Image: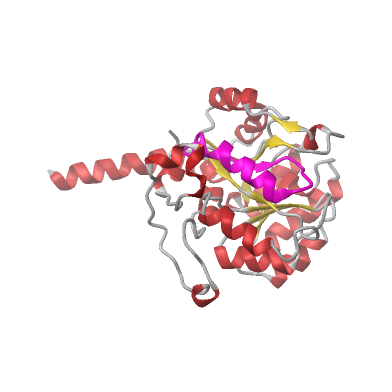
Protein backbone atom coordinates (compact mmCIF):
# COMPACT_ATOMS: atom_id res chain seq x y z
CA UNK A 1 0.00 0.00 0.00
CA UNK A 2 2.81 2.38 0.91
CA UNK A 3 4.49 1.63 -2.41
CA UNK A 4 1.25 2.35 -4.27
CA UNK A 5 0.82 5.69 -2.50
CA UNK A 6 4.40 6.62 -3.28
CA UNK A 7 3.89 5.67 -6.94
CA UNK A 8 0.71 7.76 -7.19
CA UNK A 9 2.37 10.79 -5.57
CA UNK A 10 5.29 10.43 -7.97
CA UNK A 11 2.98 10.33 -10.97
CA UNK A 12 1.07 13.41 -9.77
CA UNK A 13 4.32 15.28 -9.26
CA UNK A 14 5.43 14.31 -12.78
CA UNK A 15 2.12 15.51 -14.25
CA UNK A 16 2.46 18.86 -12.46
CA UNK A 17 5.98 19.21 -13.84
CA UNK A 18 4.74 18.48 -17.36
CA UNK A 19 2.09 21.16 -16.99
CA UNK A 20 4.47 23.87 -15.80
CA UNK A 21 4.48 26.87 -18.15
CA UNK A 22 7.59 29.06 -18.12
CA UNK A 23 7.97 32.34 -19.98
CA UNK A 24 11.69 32.39 -20.82
CA UNK A 25 11.85 36.01 -21.97
CA UNK A 26 10.75 39.02 -19.92
CA UNK A 27 12.37 42.29 -18.90
CA UNK A 28 12.09 43.99 -15.51
CA UNK A 29 13.35 47.07 -13.71
CA UNK A 30 14.44 50.53 -14.73
CA UNK A 31 16.97 51.56 -17.35
CA UNK A 32 18.91 54.82 -17.17
CA UNK A 33 19.12 56.01 -20.78
CA UNK A 34 15.44 56.98 -21.25
CA UNK A 35 15.45 57.13 -25.05
CA UNK A 36 13.24 54.06 -25.66
CA UNK A 37 10.83 51.94 -23.56
CA UNK A 38 13.43 49.18 -23.44
CA UNK A 39 16.01 51.41 -21.71
CA UNK A 40 13.59 53.42 -19.57
CA UNK A 41 11.31 51.19 -17.52
CA UNK A 42 9.98 47.63 -17.61
CA UNK A 43 7.20 47.53 -14.99
CA UNK A 44 5.93 44.08 -14.09
CA UNK A 45 2.52 44.82 -12.56
CA UNK A 46 0.34 44.39 -15.64
CA UNK A 47 2.55 41.61 -17.00
CA UNK A 48 2.21 39.50 -13.84
CA UNK A 49 -1.57 39.87 -13.83
CA UNK A 50 -1.78 38.89 -17.50
CA UNK A 51 0.61 35.97 -17.04
CA UNK A 52 -1.42 34.66 -14.11
CA UNK A 53 -4.64 34.81 -16.13
CA UNK A 54 -2.91 33.06 -19.04
CA UNK A 55 -1.78 30.23 -16.75
CA UNK A 56 1.96 31.00 -16.82
CA UNK A 57 3.61 29.66 -13.66
CA UNK A 58 7.14 31.05 -13.85
CA UNK A 59 8.96 33.82 -15.67
CA UNK A 60 12.63 34.36 -16.48
CA UNK A 61 13.62 37.99 -16.03
CA UNK A 62 16.54 40.13 -17.16
CA UNK A 63 17.12 43.85 -16.66
CA UNK A 64 16.19 46.65 -19.02
CA UNK A 65 19.04 48.19 -21.01
CA UNK A 66 21.40 50.00 -18.65
CA UNK A 67 24.82 51.66 -18.63
CA UNK A 68 25.83 49.70 -15.50
CA UNK A 69 24.71 46.07 -15.51
CA UNK A 70 26.25 45.38 -12.10
CA UNK A 71 23.72 47.84 -10.70
CA UNK A 72 20.90 46.63 -12.96
CA UNK A 73 21.47 42.99 -11.98
CA UNK A 74 21.44 43.99 -8.30
CA UNK A 75 18.09 45.70 -8.75
CA UNK A 76 16.76 42.66 -10.61
CA UNK A 77 17.82 40.45 -7.71
CA UNK A 78 15.61 42.49 -5.40
CA UNK A 79 12.67 41.99 -7.76
CA UNK A 80 13.25 38.24 -7.99
CA UNK A 81 13.62 37.95 -4.20
CA UNK A 82 10.04 39.18 -3.74
CA UNK A 83 8.65 36.11 -5.53
CA UNK A 84 11.40 33.46 -5.77
CA UNK A 85 8.95 30.66 -6.54
CA UNK A 86 7.65 32.51 -9.57
CA UNK A 87 10.57 34.59 -10.88
CA UNK A 88 13.98 33.46 -12.13
CA UNK A 89 16.83 35.86 -12.86
CA UNK A 90 19.30 36.01 -15.74
CA UNK A 91 22.30 38.36 -15.44
CA UNK A 92 22.62 40.96 -18.19
CA UNK A 93 26.23 41.42 -19.36
CA UNK A 94 27.81 43.90 -21.76
CA UNK A 95 30.68 42.02 -23.38
CA UNK A 96 32.83 45.11 -24.04
CA UNK A 97 31.99 47.42 -21.15
CA UNK A 98 32.13 44.66 -18.52
CA UNK A 99 35.35 43.08 -19.77
CA UNK A 100 37.60 42.13 -16.87
CA UNK A 101 34.78 41.84 -14.33
CA UNK A 102 32.43 39.44 -16.11
CA UNK A 103 33.38 36.35 -14.10
CA UNK A 104 32.92 38.23 -10.83
CA UNK A 105 29.55 39.61 -11.95
CA UNK A 106 28.36 36.13 -12.88
CA UNK A 107 29.73 34.62 -9.66
CA UNK A 108 27.77 37.13 -7.55
CA UNK A 109 24.62 36.65 -9.60
CA UNK A 110 24.71 32.86 -9.31
CA UNK A 111 26.03 32.30 -5.79
CA UNK A 112 24.22 35.15 -4.02
CA UNK A 113 21.09 35.75 -6.05
CA UNK A 114 20.38 32.30 -7.53
CA UNK A 115 20.41 33.55 -11.13
CA UNK A 116 20.37 30.73 -13.66
CA UNK A 117 21.48 32.23 -16.96
CA UNK A 118 23.14 35.09 -18.85
CA UNK A 119 21.55 37.64 -21.18
CA UNK A 120 23.58 39.41 -23.89
CA UNK A 121 22.21 41.74 -26.56
CA UNK A 122 23.96 42.05 -29.90
CA UNK A 123 22.72 45.62 -30.25
CA UNK A 124 25.32 46.43 -27.58
CA UNK A 125 27.93 43.70 -28.11
CA UNK A 126 28.14 40.03 -29.02
CA UNK A 127 29.29 37.45 -26.47
CA UNK A 128 33.06 37.17 -26.09
CA UNK A 129 35.19 34.36 -24.69
CA UNK A 130 35.06 35.80 -21.19
CA UNK A 131 31.27 35.45 -21.15
CA UNK A 132 31.31 31.98 -22.66
CA UNK A 133 33.98 30.78 -20.22
CA UNK A 134 31.93 32.08 -17.29
CA UNK A 135 28.82 30.35 -18.65
CA UNK A 136 30.77 27.11 -18.95
CA UNK A 137 32.16 27.41 -15.41
CA UNK A 138 28.74 27.97 -13.83
CA UNK A 139 26.85 25.72 -16.29
CA UNK A 140 24.58 28.54 -17.47
CA UNK A 141 22.74 29.01 -20.76
CA UNK A 142 23.32 32.26 -22.63
CA UNK A 143 20.31 34.01 -24.13
CA UNK A 144 21.82 36.13 -26.91
CA UNK A 145 19.74 38.47 -29.03
CA UNK A 146 21.75 38.55 -32.25
CA UNK A 147 19.59 41.31 -33.72
CA UNK A 148 19.29 39.61 -37.10
CA UNK A 149 23.04 38.91 -37.35
CA UNK A 150 22.42 35.20 -37.22
CA UNK A 151 25.73 34.30 -38.85
CA UNK A 152 27.59 35.00 -35.58
CA UNK A 153 25.78 32.10 -33.92
CA UNK A 154 27.99 29.78 -35.95
CA UNK A 155 31.07 31.29 -34.28
CA UNK A 156 30.27 31.03 -30.57
CA UNK A 157 28.11 27.89 -30.76
CA UNK A 158 30.88 25.93 -32.50
CA UNK A 159 33.63 27.31 -30.27
CA UNK A 160 31.71 26.37 -27.11
CA UNK A 161 29.79 23.16 -27.84
CA UNK A 162 29.31 22.53 -24.11
CA UNK A 163 27.50 25.85 -23.59
CA UNK A 164 23.82 26.17 -24.52
CA UNK A 165 22.74 29.26 -26.46
CA UNK A 166 19.18 30.53 -26.74
CA UNK A 167 18.45 32.77 -29.74
CA UNK A 168 15.35 34.86 -28.97
CA UNK A 169 12.82 36.02 -31.55
CA UNK A 170 13.96 33.17 -33.80
CA UNK A 171 16.85 35.48 -34.68
CA UNK A 172 15.05 38.73 -35.45
CA UNK A 173 12.72 40.92 -33.41
CA UNK A 174 12.21 42.98 -36.59
CA UNK A 175 10.75 39.94 -38.37
CA UNK A 176 13.54 39.40 -40.92
CA UNK A 177 12.48 36.19 -42.64
CA UNK A 178 16.03 35.47 -43.80
CA UNK A 179 17.21 35.53 -40.18
CA UNK A 180 14.36 33.23 -39.15
CA UNK A 181 15.30 30.80 -41.89
CA UNK A 182 18.96 30.74 -40.92
CA UNK A 183 18.15 30.13 -37.24
CA UNK A 184 15.90 27.22 -38.20
CA UNK A 185 18.81 25.73 -40.15
CA UNK A 186 21.12 26.26 -37.15
CA UNK A 187 18.64 24.59 -34.80
CA UNK A 188 18.79 21.51 -37.01
CA UNK A 189 22.60 21.42 -37.27
CA UNK A 190 23.86 22.73 -33.90
CA UNK A 191 22.89 20.66 -30.85
CA UNK A 192 23.63 23.47 -28.36
CA UNK A 193 21.49 26.13 -30.11
CA UNK A 194 17.87 26.76 -29.09
CA UNK A 195 15.41 29.49 -30.02
CA UNK A 196 12.53 31.25 -28.32
CA UNK A 197 9.27 32.29 -29.97
CA UNK A 198 8.90 35.78 -28.50
CA UNK A 199 7.55 38.40 -30.91
CA UNK A 200 7.79 36.08 -33.96
CA UNK A 201 5.09 37.27 -36.35
CA UNK A 202 5.81 34.91 -39.24
CA UNK A 203 4.02 31.93 -37.71
CA UNK A 204 5.09 29.45 -40.39
CA UNK A 205 8.73 29.76 -39.32
CA UNK A 206 7.76 28.50 -35.87
CA UNK A 207 5.94 25.64 -37.57
CA UNK A 208 9.02 24.91 -39.66
CA UNK A 209 11.34 25.09 -36.64
CA UNK A 210 9.28 22.54 -34.73
CA UNK A 211 8.94 20.27 -37.74
CA UNK A 212 12.60 20.30 -38.76
CA UNK A 213 14.50 20.77 -35.50
CA UNK A 214 12.01 19.24 -33.09
CA UNK A 215 9.95 20.57 -30.21
CA UNK A 216 12.90 19.99 -27.86
CA UNK A 217 14.78 22.93 -29.47
CA UNK A 218 12.04 25.58 -29.09
CA UNK A 219 11.22 27.68 -26.00
CA UNK A 220 8.14 29.75 -25.27
CA UNK A 221 8.88 33.42 -24.56
CA UNK A 222 6.77 36.58 -24.54
CA UNK A 223 9.21 39.54 -24.56
CA UNK A 224 7.18 40.99 -21.72
CA UNK A 225 6.25 43.28 -20.22
CA UNK A 226 5.68 45.08 -23.52
CA UNK A 227 4.12 42.16 -25.38
CA UNK A 228 1.08 40.39 -23.93
CA UNK A 229 2.13 36.96 -22.58
CA UNK A 230 -1.33 35.54 -23.31
CA UNK A 231 -1.05 36.39 -26.99
CA UNK A 232 2.43 34.90 -27.24
CA UNK A 233 1.30 31.76 -25.41
CA UNK A 234 -1.63 31.36 -27.78
CA UNK A 235 0.80 31.04 -30.70
CA UNK A 236 2.15 27.86 -29.13
CA UNK A 237 -1.36 26.51 -28.59
CA UNK A 238 -2.15 27.16 -32.26
CA UNK A 239 0.62 24.78 -33.31
CA UNK A 240 -1.73 21.96 -32.35
CA UNK A 241 1.05 19.75 -31.00
CA UNK A 242 0.59 16.57 -28.96
CA UNK A 243 0.54 17.38 -25.22
CA UNK A 244 4.02 16.01 -24.57
CA UNK A 245 5.60 18.13 -27.33
CA UNK A 246 3.67 21.24 -26.32
CA UNK A 247 4.88 20.71 -22.75
CA UNK A 248 8.48 20.72 -23.97
CA UNK A 249 8.10 24.14 -25.57
CA UNK A 250 6.02 25.63 -22.77
CA UNK A 251 8.42 24.82 -19.95
CA UNK A 252 10.30 21.56 -19.91
CA UNK A 253 13.00 22.70 -22.34
CA UNK A 254 14.02 25.82 -20.47
CA UNK A 255 13.80 24.07 -17.10
CA UNK A 256 16.17 21.43 -18.45
CA UNK A 257 18.62 24.11 -19.63
CA UNK A 258 18.76 25.96 -16.31
CA UNK A 259 18.57 23.06 -13.86
CA UNK A 260 22.34 22.41 -13.77
CA UNK A 261 23.33 25.98 -12.87
CA UNK A 262 25.79 25.98 -9.97
CA UNK A 263 23.45 28.01 -7.81
CA UNK A 264 24.78 28.77 -4.34
CA UNK A 265 28.14 27.14 -4.99
CA UNK A 266 31.45 28.94 -4.65
CA UNK A 267 33.10 27.86 -7.86
CA UNK A 268 36.79 28.67 -7.90
CA UNK A 269 39.63 27.71 -10.18
CA UNK A 270 40.48 24.80 -7.96
CA UNK A 271 37.09 23.11 -8.43
CA UNK A 272 35.73 24.67 -11.59
CA UNK A 273 35.63 21.32 -13.36
CA UNK A 274 33.80 19.48 -10.60
CA UNK A 275 30.35 18.21 -11.47
CA UNK A 276 27.87 19.52 -8.87
CA UNK A 277 24.65 18.00 -7.59
CA UNK A 278 21.77 20.44 -7.66
CA UNK A 279 20.46 19.60 -4.18
CA UNK A 280 19.94 22.87 -2.38
CA UNK A 281 17.11 24.11 -0.17
CA UNK A 282 15.25 27.38 0.07
CA UNK A 283 15.62 29.43 3.24
CA UNK A 284 12.58 31.36 4.41
CA UNK A 285 14.75 34.47 4.57
CA UNK A 286 15.38 34.18 0.82
CA UNK A 287 11.90 35.55 0.23
CA UNK A 288 12.92 38.98 1.50
CA UNK A 289 15.16 41.46 -0.34
CA UNK A 290 17.41 41.74 2.75
CA UNK A 291 18.56 38.19 2.12
CA UNK A 292 20.26 39.03 -1.19
CA UNK A 293 23.72 38.57 0.30
CA UNK A 294 22.90 35.39 2.22
CA UNK A 295 24.13 32.02 0.92
CA UNK A 296 21.77 31.22 -1.92
CA UNK A 297 20.41 27.69 -1.87
CA UNK A 298 17.58 26.40 -4.04
CA UNK A 299 15.44 23.31 -4.15
CA UNK A 300 15.05 22.39 -7.84
CA UNK A 301 11.45 21.37 -7.22
CA UNK A 302 10.55 25.02 -6.66
CA UNK A 303 11.59 25.70 -10.25
CA UNK A 304 10.00 22.60 -11.71
CA UNK A 305 6.49 22.96 -10.31
CA UNK A 306 4.26 25.98 -10.86
CA UNK A 307 2.91 27.44 -7.62
Q: In this picture, which residue range is highlighted in magenta?
A: 59-86
Please name whichever residue, 64 or 290, is drawn nearer the observer in this view of the structure.
Answer: 290
In this figure, which colouring scheme has been used for the structure? Answer: secondary structure
How many callouts does the rendering have?
Answer: 0
Q: Please provide percent x and percent y for residue 54.
A: 56, 25
Residue at x 12% of width, y 43% of height: 1
Residue 97 visible in the snapshot: yes
* Image-based side of 3 in relation to 95, left or right: left
Location of the C terminus (image quadrant): top left
Tell me if residue 41 comes above or below residue 190 in the rendering.
above
* Image-based side of 58 in relation to 99, left or right: left
In the image, farthest residue toward the bottom = 270
Tell me if residue 181 comes above or below residue 53 in the rendering.
below
Residue 103 placement: quadrant: bottom right
* Image-based side of 25 in relation to 262, left or right: right
Tell me if residue 34 comes above or below residue 262 in the rendering.
above
In the image, farthest residue toward the left = 1
Residue at x 42% of width, y 58% of height: 278
Residue 164 visible in the snapshot: no
Please name whichever residue, 44 or 23, is drawn nearer the observer in this view of the structure.
Answer: 44
**271 falls in the magenta region:** no
Q: Please provide percent x and percent y for residue 158.
A: 71, 70
Q: Please provide percent x and percent y for residue 293.
A: 50, 49
Residue 159 placement: quadrant: bottom right
Please name whichever residue, 66 or 143, is drawn nearer the observer in this view of the structure.
Answer: 66
Residue at x 46% of width, y 51% of height: 296
Tell me if residue 233 comes above or below residue 3 in the rendering.
above
Amino acid sequence: RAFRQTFIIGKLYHVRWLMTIVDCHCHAGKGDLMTHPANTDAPLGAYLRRARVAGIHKTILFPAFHTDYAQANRELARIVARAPNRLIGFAFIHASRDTGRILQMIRIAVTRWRFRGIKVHGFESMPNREICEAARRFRLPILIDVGGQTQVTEMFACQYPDVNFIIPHLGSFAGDWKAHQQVVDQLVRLPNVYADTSSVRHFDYIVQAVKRAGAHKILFGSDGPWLHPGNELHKIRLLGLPPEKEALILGQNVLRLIRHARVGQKVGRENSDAIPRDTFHIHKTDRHPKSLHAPARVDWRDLAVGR
